[in-house]
Amino acid sequence: MGMILKATGVALLSLLTCVQASTFSASKQLPKTPFFVLAGDSTTATQSANGGGWGDGFLNTTLFKGASGHNFGHNGATTISFRDGGDWDEVLTTVRQVRDDYHPFVTIQFGHNDQKPAANISLSQYTSNLERFVTEASDAGATPILVTPLSRRNYDNSTGTPRIIGSLANETMATITAAHRSHAAYIDLNQASTRYLNEIGPENAVTYNLNAEDYTHLNLPGSILFGGIVADLITEKLHTLEKSGYLRVNSKLKKDVDHGIYYWPHVSLGLT
């Protein structure tokens, strides 16, 4: 895969764009403290009456040594409305404001609303929209990370063994396609969240619901859990963030998720 060199890029970005699934050399260090800018729909957004995702759990419980960020997740957002409504401009403005003092990363996760018939967004358009986000984030001086959409917590029990309904499979594959085409880093949150939810089962999974009937959005414990999963996936691709002490996952959370054990965080601190 060819390397794409951006005029505003840095050595870290060059490493990311060289090989999609590659990890950083153990000797590489970030030149600046990371700043994470989160772009996405309500499954990234801050907890509210109408939504809530993994974003705040990620920002508040996994960043250390001065690493920080901002959650621009927007309830109801699609890859079109996020741009048309001005949210994407805010993301790029933030990147430009912090890039002299920090190394900005932009996580990009959509799909839940793009797939709805009312949005009238084809898979090919969804894919190209993500590619455009990647290009513009890179041009602004950030390292973009595409994130496949968080799984919904709806189960099919027709076989007697509850399994997550893969309602976002097309959007997941389109996100990965966009990552390969744009030479961006990506993490497969859909795969990781689906695997964990299959292992813990519906009775445990419902405890992460924003409310009793909401199988899409996350409450605060759910945000901490899935924010930790996002952080763990990022460190698998970008070892230097963990090695430098900027990104760290609660050890019990990681162990439980890796072994398919139900995890409930200490909400006030995000620690067990």
Image (tube, rainbow, N blue to C red):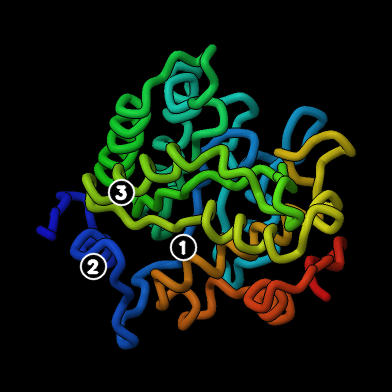
What amino acid is labelled 3 in the image? Ala
Disc 3 residue crowd, few under 14, some 14–19, many 20+, Cα 10 Å: many
Answer yes or no: do the residues labelled 3 and 1 have beta carbons within 8 Å?
no
**Residue drawn where x is 22% and y is 65% of the image:** 19
The CA span between labels 3 and 2 is 15 Å
On the image, the x and y values in percent for residue 120 come to 44, 14
What amino acid is labelled 1 in the image? Pro
* Quadrant in the rendering for residue 265: bottom right
**Residue drawn where x is 47% and y is 72% of the image:** 235
Residue 82 visible in the picture: yes
Answer yes or no: do the residues labelled 3 and 2 have beta carbons within 8 Å?
no
On the image, the x and y values in percent for residue 184 come to 29, 52
- Look at the image and tell me in which quarter the N terminus lies: bottom left
What amino acid is labelled 2 in the image? Leu
**Residue drawn where x is 76% and y is 54% of the image:** 160
On the image, the x and y values in percent for residue 95 come to 41, 44
Residue 220 visible in the picture: no
Total numbered labels placed on residues in the image: 3
Instruction: Provide the residue designation for mark 1.
Output: 34
* Quadrant in the rendering for residue 267: bottom right
* Quadrant in the rendering for residue 63: bottom right
Q: Nearer the viewer, residue 89 or 51?
A: 51
The CA span between labels 3 and 1 is 21 Å
**Residue drawn where x is 69% and y is 58% of the image:** 197
Q: Residue furthest front?
A: 159
Instruction: Provide the residue designation for mark 3.
Output: 179
Of labels 3 and 1, earlier in sequence is 1
Q: Which mark is residue 15?
A: 2
Disc 1 residue crowd, few under 14, some 14–19, many 20+, Cα 10 Å: many
Above or below 83: residue 211: below
Q: Nearer the viewer, residue 158 or 65?
A: 158
